[in-house]
Amino acid sequence: MDSALAGGRDIPDLTVFSTKVGRAIKTPDHAYAVFEVKRGHDVADNSAEIYTEKKKYIKAGTRWFFILDQEEVHKWDVMAKTEAAVYRWEDLTNPERFGVCFAEVRPSHVALEEQLKDFRDGRTRYAFQSIDELGHRGQRTMKSPPQHCLWTATTRTVTLWTSLRPPGPRSIAN
């Protein structure tokens, strides 16, 4: 966990990066979950405004966005683009409820190896995240195509997972 994202002046309060072989991959493309923390009950009173202001912290690889204060935790599934799930801290004293709220930041969920396995097995809800929708026009940081195609594609350049698989028997015979 770390707050600094490369190249950014505005930084979230906490960033959970994806890991590879147990080590954090500290790049914006691997900022798996982002947390913004407020004092008092600002989130309970102004969650929509805070989200609008702070969504700039969402990067191409961000899957979960949390805003919390002393009363509530608001959790957005960035890929599903749904309304925030809201949890009250008084309810999170129950270990099961706490586990549900923060399940996505468990080590098994942030491990890139597990994320890629889920992707290959068809257990993910998406194939790419448009950085144009996030307002990062022109930002492309293609590093490792098999790893990166899971996370990022622009509306102009889309790399399909199938294009990265080895050619099938028919292609080899030709």
Image: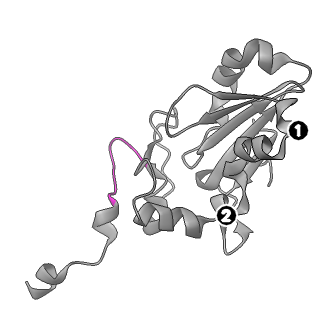
**Mark 1 near mark 2, Cβ–Cβ under 8 Å?**
no
What numbered label is drawn on residue 93? 1
Secondary structure under tag 2 reads helix
What numbered label is drawn on residue 148? none
Q: Which residues are magenta?
A: 153-160
Q: Is residue 28 left or right of residue 154?
A: right
Q: Residue at x 69, y 56 (%)?
A: 17
Q: Mark 1 vs mark 2: give the one in front.
A: 1
Q: Which image quarter holds the C terminus? A: bottom left
Residue on which the image places disc 2: 108
Locate residue 49, reporting x and y percent.
69, 15
| Kind of residue sitting beneath label 1 | Thr
| Vertical relation: 57 (above or below) 38 | below
Q: Residue at x 40, y 51 (%)?
A: 127
| Vertical relation: 2 (above or below) 48 | below
Mark 2, residues whose alpha carbon is within 10 Å: few (<14), some, or many (≥20)? some
| Kind of residue sitting beneath label 2 | Ser
Locate residue 109, reporting x and y percent.
64, 58
Residue 154, visible in the rendered structure: yes
Q: Is residue 21 left or right of residue 149?
A: right
Q: Residue at x 78, y 49 (%)?
A: 4
| Alpha carbon separation for disc pair 1 and 2 | 23 Å
Locate residue 67, reporting x and y percent.
75, 31
Q: Which image quarter holds the N terminus? A: bottom right
Residue 18, visible in the rendered structure: no
Q: Residue at x 46, y 51 (%)?
A: 152
Secondary structure under tag 1 reads helix
Quadrant of the rendered structure where residue 53 is?
top right
